[in-house]
Amino acid sequence: MVEEEAKNLTMELSEKGGVENNGFVQNEAFDDKETDASSQEEMPKPCTVDVDPVAQEETVLKPYAGMPKEVLLKFSSQARYRVTREILFWLIIAAAVALVCATIAIIALSPKCLDWWQAGPIYQIYPRSFKDSNMDGNGDLKGIQEKLDHVTYLNIKTIWITSFFKSPLKDLGYGAEDFYDVDPIFGSMSDFENLIAAIHDRGLKVIMDLIPNHTSDKHRWFQLSRNRTGKYTDYYIWQDCMEAAGAVLPPNNWVSVFGNSSWQFDDVRKQCYFHQFGKEQPDLNFRNLDVQQEIHDIIKFWLNKGIDGFSFSTVKFLLEAAHLRDEPQVNKSQNGETVTAYSQLYHDYTTTQVGMHDIVRSFRQTMNQFSREPGRYRFMVSGDDEKEDIEATMMYYGTTFIQEADFPFNFNLMNMKNLSGNSIFEAVDLWMKNMPVGKWPNWATGSPNAARISSRIGKEYVNVMNMLLLTLPGTPVTYYGEEIGMENIASENVSEEHMNSDPVVTFPEKSPMQWDGKVNAGFTEGNSSWLPVNSNYQTVNVEIQRSWSNSTLNLYRELTRLRNNELPMNRGWMCYIWNDSNVLVYVRELDGLDRTFMMVLNFGQESTVDLKAIVPNLPSEAVIRLSTNFSNAGKAVSTKLIKTEMGEGLVLEYKTAKPVHTMEAFQGKCFVAEKVCYSMALNLLYMNC
């Protein structure tokens, strides 16, 4: 009865459009248990509930957090979600492609960064005269380490240490007795290693001298060669000659740089050996491949010690003509037997022989093996003075395809016979016009073998020469002491002992560095120094000039700061504006940058120049950025009337939309080593402009 009523109820609900509710279904296991427990009970039947169809249609499923995958897929296929997703996807792809393209473009257009040897001045130190650390009167490697703060104070990043090899110190140590050791007068190899570490810890670089042409006659190689021992027999240049009544009859008329015959008879070997310099400095035989390999091994040894570069000197003397013919006389009517001076012959057979540059380039190739790490490029300079032969000098740059020196040392500013605005212009222009395209210039106003600026041209020109040095394009090289205006010592103050030990060497420009006004200028705490200190040390020294705002030292420091911080100064154009017997005027500017620097340098007498008439587009006023007279800095001057006193220098700054190098009137008067442009919008440098 009950069963029939349930069936009737189900049928009625079905007819009224009800839906079956399966929301609760008993567990089958539970079902079985109930059946077993009481066969009298029966499973409840599913019931149906009457639901309004309209209400069902109004129930719409919406996205919600944590929805399962099946529900998510129902929405992801809808147009409004699919289109949005695809738009975002392609925008991300486009942005990524644009970013990659922009990166490639920036890399492709960005100029090569200046190398460390291009980015700042080089400071040349003659170690025996820089600082004595052990009170023996001789400067040493520890002394250099003690004074590294002075180098950083000058805003200098590279130190050049002249020869410190173990040596009898003839010709100031340029004839090495042992290329693998430090002379005890300068310290030990441990001192050198400590110095290198200290230099690199300060972020500085260091280069050293290497003179491959000759050795000392005390060198082990020479001792073995004079005894004809094995491969060393031909390490030097030996020729038969005769000695009669104490006089040597040499194989030819070749004369040494220091005068007299370049052949010296050896009592042990009973032959003459060849020497381009002193008789204590026999020339190596570079036609012997074993000798070349020895020099390559020496280069590798010091590079492994941490040296960042080399200055190779006397390389033009590496080879001599094998035929040994007499060299032609300058004065053909002169009696050949009276020819004793180097200047009396044309040195066609003893300098710059065919094959010499190949040897120098092989040195470069060895150094390149150590230049593969980022930031560890090994720098190379050749230090031969070719005098007026500018073409021979430029050959040391190498060729377009074969690298040689990064630059040959520039002696032009030291070889001038007189000082004037015109002579400075000629010295600068000679280098810039002959330098191969894309190469890097360099400038120096002093060296261990040239009189100091104060003594050579006058102390009133020290500041303006430093201003010239530090505002020209390229790498400036400063000889120690020039930053404070040191002068030569008087020749009569050099002891007879020194003159006798090194009769061919000049000493006045090698006097001890003047650090302060104390005894021996702070160079040594010993009783004396190897050379006397200049008598002006109490007023010309580092300590006192650091306290003077208008000192040579502080001007030098401000100039190096200007050079390091201003783009036109370190890699921009240089254009000559004007030169006469008194002044030289030039500008430094950069494409894309509206700021220009103009140097007005006086190397003669008081002068007034109308620059507005020379450069019509010049602004009517310019601001003095730096002056040899510090009190003038910041003042405005009229470009129609710029007055300078004797030895005065001005660095003027002005803004212009038309740089000088774009003006037709100055074509052929402008030079740039590595052309780049500046984008003010992006604040970056780029090429192809």
Image (tube, grey):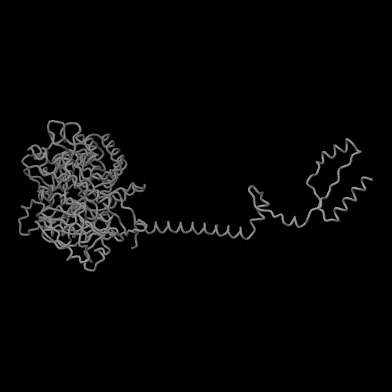
Near-viewer residue (666 or 671): 666
| Relative horizontal placement of residue 401, taking residue 666 as reference (left or right) | right
Residue 247 lies, in percent from the top left, at 7, 45
In depth, the one of 37 and 286 nearer the eye is 37
Farthest-out residue, bottom:
664
Residue 302 in the image, given as x and y percentages of width and height: 29, 42
Residue 372 or residue 26, whichever sits in front: 26
Query: Does the rendering let one see residue 265?
Result: no
In this view, 564 is above or below 225: below
As displayed, is residue 498 above or below residue 335? above
284 over 567 or under it: above or below: above
Count how many numbered circles sit on residues in the image.
Answer: 0
State the residue at coordinates (78%, 55%). Answer: 52
Q: Residue at x 19, y 62 (%)?
A: 577
Q: Is residue 275 left or right of residue 333?
A: right
> Which quadrant does the C terminus fall into?
bottom left
**Quick check: can you spot residue 475?**
yes
Residue 520 image point, x, y percent: 13, 35
Q: Position of residue 601 (x, y in %)?
A: 15, 56
Q: Nearer the viewer, residue 172 or 200?
A: 200
Res 440 quadrant in image: bottom left
Where does the N terminus fall, quadrant-wise? top right
Horizontal placement of 249 versus 157: left or right? Answer: left
Specify the farthest residue to the right.
1
- Residue at figure coordinates x 11%, y 57% from the top left: 420
Image: 649 above or below 282: below
